[in-house]
Amino acid sequence: MNGFQIFEVFFLSGLSGFGIVYGLLAFRLEKRNNLGDSHGQAGLYSSSVTITDRQDKMPIGVNLDKTPAYQYVEAHAPKKATYPKAPEGNEQVRKQQ
Amino acid sequence: MATLCKNCGNALIYDPTIGKMHCAQCGSTFTAEEVESEEKKYREEERVLSRDEVYGEGSEEAVEEFLECYVYTCSSCGGEIVIHGSETSTTCVYCGNPNVVFSRIAKEKMPDYIIPFTLSKEEALDMIRESMPRSIFIPKEVRHFKAEDVRGIYLPFWIVNANHEETCVIKSTVQSGKHSTTILSGRTGTMCIKNFPLDGCAILSNESSSRLEPFNMKLMRPFDEDYLLGFYSNASDISYDEMYEITEKRAREIFEEEVMGSVRGSSPKILAQSHQTAILTDYKYAMFPVWFVTFSYEGKHNTILVNGNTGKVVCGLPWRKALFWTLTILTGIILSVIGFYLFKGLFYVLVSSFSNSSSSNSDGRGKLIVLIAAGIVTLFTTAVKKMKKVFHQIKLTQSSETFSFVKKRQE
């Protein structure tokens, strides 16, 4: 092996060695030092998600602006809610009277 | 104002260990329903004085820092009670009696529900000590920390029901034999969120308060101000836009996690989307219990949060940086040297064959090198994400806003 090849092997083994150690220690640190790292489960707050439309294997366009993806989103975009909902704006939230 | 014991007239406090009001003087206990006093009437007309009005404009006490303070009179001893920001209950600094400030929780601000504290101060500290893992990276001074302040604070929460509608296109990669294909999948759906609690305190980070979840909603009961006695509390001070922002963010997380799981292929990513979240008008206002425990380490203040209902501990613990990096470098060097000798033969074959052999063999070996390199890069990237998370959690724990939120209350 010439000098360059030895450097390549050393570089790759160094990257692997440091990568494995850094990865393992970072995982351990994050697991041990982060207490309570979770939210309430989704099941506590939501009824099941109802899928009203699905399309698999959509064609991929060339120009991102005109892809079928954007056409799909535009066609199925949620309509503005007409039922009563909480106010919006910068005022402080107040109880419903 | 203080609620007094029927038997001896001493101020009552709520004791989480027995779930009742307790008189430290004579030992009597009462449920919230048994305690009735004229102070429970809502004094909506009562006008509070600002510090400026009490001490005069331009006086020494009327510095900018205090202009958000309001002054009340303790009903037990007549002493001055200073309330900051959106606080609604505190302790008189002169007689130590708990006081609930009625005009702060006038009818329009009165919560609908409350989950009383079920953990006492000692139990909260025990929960923290039990949660402390054994790790070489956690300093001994942190594992056996000395609490400087332990404050039980009722935080304002809004319990909302919301409808979420979303349409999105998800990009994913499907492997078929040696080839991988990118596919697009469209999903449109609706979701209803029920009884979602969101933190109504502007100064406290939403990320910290959301990690306190879940709260045991079965213990939620109609609000009675007697539960506040002996604890601190705050009124809500977030805007409607902030309420929408928090709800929408969580709704999107739940919806997108669900639809991503319904798509074929790996590494799904949202390519395009449109969404709408509408909070229904039946939102409720509640107070949830949280213990705030502060301690110092290396000159920095740290605040640990404990869910006063379930005992869940939330914080990012300070860690021994010097030890971590020294261990990483030294062990990395050792592994690299071992790796060099182990892979020397393999890489020699790969590298020399890559230079000399036919294109089909060199393709295969080239792919192997790329695969190894990709694996290493993925490991590094994941490790960097984990470290960023650690730094972020420490930042929340050592946040000066959270520390002053706890510290500025009267003792």
Image: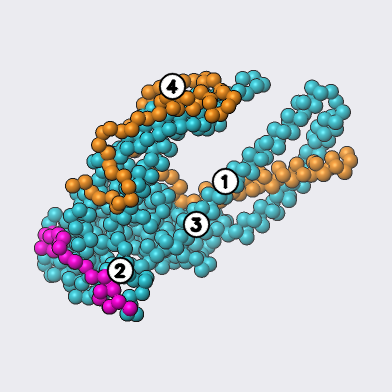
In-image side of A57 versus B355 (left or right) = left
Disc 1 from disc 4: Cα separation: 33 Å
Asked whether the residues under the numbered discs 1 and 4 touch, taking CB atoms below 8 Å apart as contact, a structural biologist would say no
Q: Nearer the viewer, mark 3 or mark 2?
A: 2
Specify whether residue A49 is in view: no
Disc 2 from disc 4: Cα separation: 56 Å
Of helix, strand and loop, which one carries label 1? helix
Asked whether the residues under the numbered discs 3 and 1 touch, taking CB atoms below 8 Å apart as contact, a structural biologist would say no
Chain that the image shows in orange:
A
Disc 3 from disc 2: Cα separation: 28 Å
Q: Which mark is residue B69?
A: 2
Q: Which residue is mark 1?
A: B385
Q: Nearer the viewer, mark 1 or mark 4?
A: 4
Q: Residue at x 37, y 30 (%)?
A: A78
Image position of B102 with respect to B72: above or below: above
Task: Report whether mark 1 lies on the same chain as mark 4.
Answer: no
Of helix, strand and loop, which one carries label 4? strand
Front one among B331 and B156: B156
The segment highlighted magenta reads B35-58
Q: Residue at x 71, y 42 (%)?
A: A16
Quadrant for the C terminus of chain B, please. Answer: bottom left
| Chain-order first, disc 3 or disc 1 | 1
Q: Which mark is residue B106?
A: none
Q: Which residue is mark 3?
A: B395
| Chain-order first, disc 1 or disc 2 | 2
Q: Quadrant of residue A86?
A: top left
Crowding near the residue tagged with mark 3, few <14, some 14–19, many ≥20 C-alpha atoms within 10 Å: some
Front one among A29 and B156: B156
In-image side of B93 versus B330 (left or right) = left
Residue at far right of view: A2
Q: Given the image, what chain letter belongs to the residue carrying mark 4? A: A
Chain that the image shows in cyan:
B
